[in-house]
Amino acid sequence: MNPSYKNPPLTSSQKCWGVIITIVLAIFYSCCPPFEPVYPTHAIRDEYDFIVVGGGTAGSVIAHRLAEKGNVSILVIEAGRHDYDSSIRIPIASQSLLDSDKNLVWNYKTSPQKYSSKGFVNNQMSLPLGKVLGGSSSVGDMVYGRGNPQDYQSWGATWSWDSLLPYFLKSEKNIDIDSSSYHNNKGEIPVSVGDDECVLSSAFTSAAQEMGYKLVDYTSREQLGVSNLLFTVKDGERWSTARAYLEPAVNRRYKVHLATSSIASKILFSGKRAVQVVVNQDGLNIPVRAKKEIILTGGAIETPKLLMLSGIGPAEELSKHRITPIVTLPVGKNLKDPLKFWMRYTVNGSASTITKDRVTSAKSFLEYYFHKTGFWSQSLQSQSTLFANTKNPTSKQPNVNINMLRAVSLPNQAEILGIKYELEEQFNAGLYDSNTDGVTFVPTLLHPTSSGEVKLRSTGIHDPPLIDSNYLSSDEDVDTFLSAIRLVQLLVKQPSLSPIIKDHIALPSNPHPTDSDEFWKHAIRNFAFTTGQPSGTCAIGQVVTEDLSVRGVEGVRIVDSSVFPQTLSTDSTGALIGIAEKAADLIKKKHYNN
């Protein structure tokens, strides 16, 4: 049953501190305006050797590696803007970056869902994906992961986990772990362990071990067990691929040009050969020739949209919108999007939880401003994570992941998720404003069997595509989710966690007996929400060949999560960086024979 929370009136001391913090923040932003990376500006030329469509996680890596060649020209087209917003660098601000007012994300909505999202407005899921240089590496949760070796078995020999390991190592610049078989401290993207002084993380790890789970390195071959998370954070600041890869590339003898706030509206073909990209910038359509290749890195939603607008897609979809077909392929099919769920608990008072007062205190501000330490330098995620297979104990591939947020509530969470208006008050329960000490366990369904589809809404380049994720259409997914919830319930009863955990805070509007299977299945179908990592819409073997070239045409390659034939057993950022590293080598080998 939900505890009752009331917001106490502010004391005169609290009001005084509020004024002080406001003044301090005003001074901070006047003295330290939003960080602005040094990106030279250039007029778009008529032609380049390579055109990279998307300056996100993978696109930044591709541009950097191609720019290493001696005589090369590269255009990166990014629909979003520069990553100059200072909050991008502040780890604790990651949740706020998903707010549509920030204009850093695509404000996608799925079509009304039949089997899920019943607690969301119009039964639609919000999909806030990165729309800024660095993409989701600039606005996501900063978790670094590589996936499980079994995840890659359907990808072909080129993309086995073992063949990708050298590229995982090439990209990694680990701050806390010495170079070894699984880690490197001389790469490009900074990676570090989370806050190792967190009492909650230590209790989580011990509780998992009390249940029989081994302590592992989840980025190694052996993923099942409890592990310390790695984050793309260095010295208290987020490092996106834009910062680690793209900024140095743009400043490398002007080989890379950026076209931000620009949309690639169409790929033009001569026969089956892709020759130009039409760039829509400031309302003007500018055709730009690619002498060698066009590389699509826009992600699992935008990449299939561009392909279909260009005449590559399912025959029925192209015909519906009167688009002349270049080649018919199952573009947009096989959309996979893992879901997660919140299980919120109050805890006995602990300074390591993140509350409104602690985050907004003068102490937190000053710690970060002068030393890049304190709450602002930390992720909402605890340091510990658990990977398990709840259905097949002999499998080496997890089907669920359990994480823990060091907060019971976040500002604007109901608005960001799109909770129905009539449920917002119950959903929020006054938790953020009342500074409730608590944690949120986050069970995640890693490999949904349900799949959806991306279609064109129209031929308008500014119209978002139709996204039918078809979440939880498979009862198997709900059953797996339920097993993950039961795993969390066992975890919090272990000797290391039970003295800390107090009350479960139920989600609203559930007519079933508390803690029954029906109770949780109802909650899952109402409030499970996206991990923000859709994939599969241009899968290897279906839309692209093993070298990621689009089938049936020449001169177009895809390097983003749309090529994943199945979901990964982790956050995909680290994996995508490694995949982009290898793809860059494939591109250079084709055009430069090295």
Image: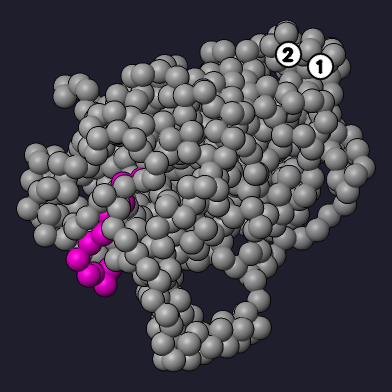
User: Could you say where residue 379 lies in the image, as x and y percent from the top left?
Assistant: 40, 60
Say whether residue 564 is visible: no
Tag 2 near tag 1, CB within 8 Å: yes
Residue 330 in the image: x percent, y percent? Answer: 63, 13
Q: What is the magenta range?
A: 342-353
Q: Residue at x 67, y 33 (%)?
A: 302
Where residue 234 sits, quadrant-wise, is bottom left
- Please give left or right for residue 576 compared with residue 11 in the image: right
Q: Which residue is mark 1?
A: 321
Query: How many other residues sit within 10 Å of disc 2, few (<14), some (14-19) or many (≥20)?
Result: many
Q: Is residue 350 magenta?
A: yes
| Number of numbered discs | 2
Residue shown at the point (64%, 53%) measured from the top left: 100
Q: Residue at x 63, y 70 (%)?
A: 35
Left-right relation of 110 to 504? right
Q: Is residue 90 visible?
A: yes
The image position of residue 220, as x and y in percent, is 28, 38
Circle 2: element type: helix
Q: Is residue 561 left or right of residue 199?
A: right
**Label 2 sits on residue:** 317
* Res. 513 mark: none
Q: Position of residue 107 (x, y in %)?
A: 65, 44
Real-space Cα distance between discs 2 and 1? 7 Å
- The amino acid type found where label 1 is placed reads His
Q: Quadrant of residue 592?
A: top right
The kind of secondary structure element at disc 1 is loop
Instruction: Give the vertical position of 472 relative to 218 (above or below).
Output: above
Q: Is residue 304 magenta?
A: no
